[in-house]
Image (cartoon, rainbow, N blue to C red):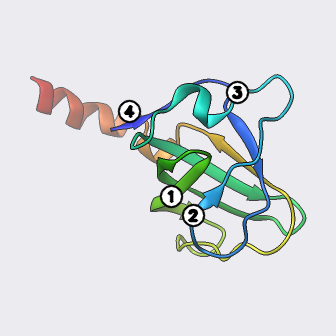
């Protein structure tokens, strides 16, 4: 299950489609390592402001300061993994709308839970 915590946001200069190395929290934010243990899953978003590239998914905190992009939920690359270029990215925890309980999902949840 993906874990979510408030105010978790770090920088990264990782490029490509692989794991992201997290390089430090923004001022007044927490680091992923402050709230997750190695092996924990979380919802994440990565944004590269200079190009507008972004990705939201389910990731795994796979090693100290490392986020593995496990499942891509949405992205600026038609829902596929983004090949991020150079520049400083924001990597933060989020609760994606596609995973939330909305009016349409509430009916299915009500049936499933009885």
Circles 4 and 2 in contact, beta carbons < 8 Å: no
Label located before the other in sequence (4 or 2): 2
The CA distance from mark 3 to mark 2 is: 20 Å
Please identify the quadrant where the N terminus is shown: top left
Q: Is 8 in front, or is 95?
A: 8
Q: Residue at x 68, y 55 (%)?
A: 46
Please identify the quadrant where the C terminus is shown: top left
Circles 1 and 2 in contact, beta carbons < 8 Å: yes
Q: Which mark is residue 30?
A: 3
> Quick one: SS at disc 4?
helix
Residue 6 percent coordinates (x, y): 62, 24
From the viewer's perspective, tell me whether residue 98 is left or right of residue 18: left
Q: Which residue is mark 1?
A: 68
Decide: few, some or many residues near mark 1? Use Cα within 10 Å; few <14, some 14-19, many ≥20.
some
Q: Which residue is mark 4?
A: 103
Label located before the other in sequence (3 or 4): 3
The CA distance from mark 3 to mark 4 is: 32 Å
Decide: few, some or many residues near mark 3? Use Cα within 10 Å; few <14, some 14-19, many ≥20.
some
Q: Which residue is mark 2?
A: 19
The CA distance from mark 1 to mark 4 is: 32 Å
Label located before the other in sequence (1 or 2): 2
The CA distance from mark 1 to mark 2 is: 5 Å
Q: Which mark is residue 79?
A: none
The CA distance from mark 4 to mark 2 is: 35 Å
> Quick one: SS at disc 1?
strand
């Amino acid at each position: 299950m993906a874990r979510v915590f408030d105010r978790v946001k770090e920088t990264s200069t990782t490029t490509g489609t692989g794991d992201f190395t997290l390089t430090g929290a923004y001022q007044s934010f927490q680091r992923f390592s402050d709230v997750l243990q190695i092996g924990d899953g979380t919802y994440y978003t990565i944004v590269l402001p200079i190009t507008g590239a972004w990705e939201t998914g389910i990731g795994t905190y796979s090693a100290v300061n490392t986020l593995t992009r496990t499942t891509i939920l949405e992205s600026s690359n038609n829902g596929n993994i983004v090949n991020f270029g150079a520049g400083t990215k924001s990597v933060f925890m989020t609760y994606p709308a596609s995973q939330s309980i909305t009016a349409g999902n509430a009916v299915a949840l009500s049936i499933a839970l009885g």
